[in-house]
Amino acid sequence: MGISPVLWQFLVKWLHSSALFPVEASTIAPYTDALYFFLVSVSLVGLIFVTLLIFYFSVRYRRDKHPVAVQVEGSTILEATWTIIPLAIFLVVFVWGGLLYFRIYDPPPNAMNIYVVGKQWMWKAEHPGGQHEINALHIPVGQPVQLTMISQDVFHSFSIPDFRVKREVIPGRYSTVWFQATDPGTYHIFCTQYCGTLHSGMIGEVTAMTPADYKKWLDQSNSGMSLAQNGERLFASMGCNACHSGNAAARGPNLAGVYGSKVTLTDGSQVLVNDAYLRDAILNPSQHVTAGYAPIMPTYQGQISEDGLIDIVEFIKQLQSNYRIQQTFVTADSNQASPTTPSVGSNQDSVKP
Amino acid sequence: MDNTVATEHPHTHETAVHVEHEHIALPQHRHHFETVEQQREAGSFGMWLFLLTEIMFFGGLFFAYLLYRNWYYAAFASASETLSIQIGTANTAILITSGFFMALAVWAAEVRKKKMLVWTLILTTVFGVAFLGFKYDEYHAKWVEHHIPGAHFDIKDFVNPPINPQTHKPIEDPISPDMAQRTQIFFFLYFAMTGMHALHMIIGVGLLFWLIRRAARGDFSAGYVAPIENFGLYWHFVDIIWLFLYPLLYLINRHPMH
Amino acid sequence: MTRTTPKEDSMAETVHHTEAQDPTNVTNPEHTSHHIVTPAQYGLVFGTLLILTGVTAAVAFIPLGWANPVVALFIACFKACIVVLFFMHAKYQSRLIKMTIGSGIFMFLSLIVMTLSDYISRSWGLW
Amino acid sequence: MSSTATIVTLPDQATARLPKRNYLNNEDGLLSWLLTGDHKRIAMLYLISITFFFFIGGAFAGLIRLELLTPQPDLVAADTYNKFFTMHGIIMVFLFLVPSVPATIGNFLMPIMVGAKDLAFPKINLLSWYLYVLGGILLMAALVLGGVDTGWTFTTPLSTHYLNTHVITAALAIFVAGFSSIFTGLNFIVTIHRMRCPGMTWFRLPLFVWSNYAASLLMVLGTPVLAITLVLVLLERVFGIGVFDPTKGGDPLLFQHLFWFYSHPAVYIMILPGMGVISETISTFSRKRVFGYTAVAFSSVAIALFGFFVWAHHMFIMGISNYSALVFSLLTMLVAVPSAIKIFNWAFTLQKGSITFETPMLYSFGFMGLFTIGGVTGVFLGSLGMDIHLTETYFIVAHFHFVMVGGMLMAFLAGIHFWWPKMTGRMYPESLSKLAAVTTFIGFILTFMPQFILGYLGMPRRYHAYPPEYQVLNVLSTAGATVLGVGYMLPLLYLGWSLKYGAIAGDNPWQATGLEWQIQSPPLTENFIEIPIMDHEAYDYEWLEQKQKNEVTTVG
């Protein structure tokens, strides 16, 4: 008979694609795998020990050989041994796991940022240069990439097994994850949090490319408008510039250079202005009133999509002076010019046409 | 098949005083309890355990309240002011009174005063129903004001509070529209918490009717007080929930600065 | 008055224990003769509760800042305590019942504190 | 089988008869069952209904595995598949695992083990069965009306705002079934505290009672939080309010906190009673007192206590604060220790024993092996960094199936076989049941081992279709599920057969020391003619020997 040809085909395919663990395609993967192999070996040792104990006792003390049981009460020393040794191992695992956790969720400062919006049932990636992708993500190798992710509807979870990274994508809140791909190639993106009917269709591919290829790809897929430019348009069309004009008499706070700074709110608390803060301040302005200003800003909840919010956040991020805002008064059409004040962020390379 | 473990019945050598607990079957004595006392202890312990689950049941609601009150304090303060503090305080007093009569009922049962037991139970019920009546009145007012969360909710009272004719000032501080939307969360929690509480009250009143009937029949005037006692625990527990709901829901911010 | 049978572990004593109650639940200290709270005591508690209700409502109108909710909750806790102790007779109950009440409060606080710790520490940001 | 290889001592089959009067024939007619207050009859009612739901849930598992045979979405549509795993999860968790051992074996034996005539509140016990059935009917209604596809975790805002299936019916079903388990737990706690017979001190209680006590604490304290959470989900769904909806100012993580506050302790509700069964069987079949009785007893309580403070490890990647993540990870490591203590104590109970290998013992060995694997893989998931890669994949599916199915179901079957003679008065067929035990073990390993690998490869859970490179492992898993299905059908058949044709078991076929073995099988309705007096420690085999000697001399 021999092995069924169909099954044989499966086996060959499987052994070729991935054997017992996925490929290591990011700088994080070896660290995760190290902990994994440590855990697997400790588990195997433990399991084998327990199994051997059971087998040995079963053979040695089976009724045929040992007809009368000897009553033993217990042993404090033994109890202490198997309390302390597992506890010590578990504590090592805890510390190791904690270190790994912060390695995975603490992005390096020079990471380039890409936005990801999850919705039923697709992933939408938005590069700062305005390149949009659906269920795909192009990234350069050798460069830390940070994803700033948000969901438009329900919980999703962004997972790239070959990079060993995963993070829940939550409605109403930015979550981030970062990685640095090491090998060019294509890898799976999965949504791992059950998100409704086509959950299993919410998959995509991440394409890791050499920096040169990546640059080529960016140029080819340029839509003509960067996120910040889109944001500038929205900023004007939604009338944000009326108050946030940067003038001394303006009714809203000056936004130039606000990103990354600390502002004081009316209740006296100090907050760091980051993506999440900017987004919240647009949607729930009365909870984020800067000290010295009246709480007059209306909410934009329901009037602006998550993509639009990302555009505006990106625009404010790059706003170093109020020049562009002033420009929006004189020309309604702002798409001829790009922001004139590039920031130091490494992603600027890709933004410039 | 007898078990040889049972070499001796524990109570066979007992003094005559206690024999009545044992072998003269009291009507309430369930066969699987060794003694009436054991039955009574088991019942009371069971009731306390049930109240334990009730604490955890309300615990989830209390946590949700705590979280959102901190997040949306302005909305909570503003929405809380639309609740009638008069009715709220009166209802607190009414419920305490109801609880007081319940406590007296337990005493009456213990000292075997049948008439007093029936009357205190009736008064407990009356005050309980009065509480529910006021509660209905409050709910109705919320309905009229469009303060029931959902499709018909209206935030205008919080964005543009009505003007007080005497002072010509708004009766409360206006809040921004986005914050005003959050009053829905307050009212949702208000209805969920007081609604759950009222549901417990309604169940309690139902049980009270049953207890009154049995008390009038004389069931609890011969030393058998466990049902009254255990119901008392339940009724007092419902009181306690309200003792917390009252300050949390009605008294968030009753001293506006204007 | 409250009377707790001492813990006994040996069979010899318990078998010959001449009590109506199950003498062998030796770890159950609930062999209390029943304590009866008098109506006068109930009246006292009732009066205290009514007064405290008035106080709590009045204090709410005095601006105390952060202390307002603290005072309100403190009074509510006090009221709840005397209801539990006297109306519900917890003061005269066995240790088991007292532990039951204690564990209820403990679990309630655990739910609140452990969940809240997540919300509070979230604003501390990433490290 | 040589005579020394077994401890089974049956009465002479030629003359033996079932006792004339027992709880089964005490009263006749359907109503005498439906209105019974007898804990043993209620246990049998539970056993029948739980078995029914187990096979329904199992059928869904079969359909899931069948769909996953191929990478393409070819057997059923995606929404149907989602309904399959949702129904599988809800039925198995709330209608099978949570009530399995406590409500059947526990209900039957708890009062006997503590030496009482019944549970403290027989009527509430019956009520809890009716609530269970009502919950089951509601869930079946949801199924018949078109199903529900939230997953058993009811993640908001998906369950509250984005699905048009019968979420409300299903949530009500769980709400009702939850109260059934609250009442069971309450009844157990009161019974253990208040109904112990003379001489039955806490440290003379069988370990089965201890572990059920710990599980009952969790039921009583945890389940109400689930109940209120489901109420909030219902209200949010019906009225469109946003306590859990971020667009309306709510926080979806609040749902996660409240849900897992119950649902993590729930896994201890499921496993603890199973651990109790293992303590009984291991001791009986090695003729030895459980090694470190106190340690095993307290480890149950420790699991119950720590089990309450680890729930957020289900949320490590969901955006809880890093500080909280650290705290909950540390506590998770601590809760793993008592389980390890139990495993080693059971293993050392075998030492210097006199071991025989009847079916319950085989299942118990299966439990120890599979639960060890399930337990250590839990440590993988409790470790923060590792969890990121493993969570929400098939690794987690494999992990909790090792604990729940490999652990709990093995323990349930061990218990059912162990106490079957006591419940029915008849023995099950020994060799067939050994075959079933081995089949189950092999089928189980084959089904769920590949899923660990699949998980590390990254295959997400709840996927209807998957990339083709995962197929081989999925084929293995489905093949294993077939074997496993056979392993579960066998006991149903031969246990049914044994009801009429099994050998008469006698009072104490295993020569076990528990109080339940000192009375007739099946027991009398009132369990004991006279309340027993406990004058020896639990698992005291010397006492048993002495007692049997005395009986012989008395008869002689």
Image: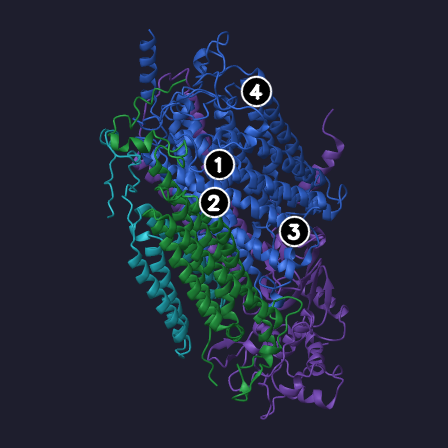
Chain colours: A purple, B green, C cyan, D blue
Q: Secondary structure at mark 4?
A: helix
Are the residues under marks 3 and 1 on the same chain?
A: yes
Marks 2/3: CA–CA distance: 23 Å
Q: Amino acid at mark 1?
A: Pro
Marks 3/4: CA–CA distance: 40 Å
Quarter location, residue D288 = top left
Label 2: chain? Answer: D
Of pointers 3 and 1, the one earlier in the residue sequence: 1
Marks 2/4: CA–CA distance: 33 Å
Dividing the image into 4 quarters, which one contains the C terminus of chain D?
Answer: top left
**Which residue occupies the foreground of this view, C14 or D515?**
C14
Of pointers 1 and 4, the one earlier in the residue sequence: 1
Q: Which mark is residue D167?
A: 3
Q: Amino acid at mark 2?
A: Met
Residue C29 shows up from this direction: yes
Q: Amino acid at mark 3?
A: Val
Q: Secondary structure at mark 2?
A: helix
Q: Which mark is residue D499?
A: 4
Are the residues under marks 2 and 4 on the same chain?
A: yes
Q: Are marks 3 and 1 in contact (CB under 8 Å)?
A: no
Q: Which residue is tagged 1?
A: D102
Residue A35 shows up from this direction: no
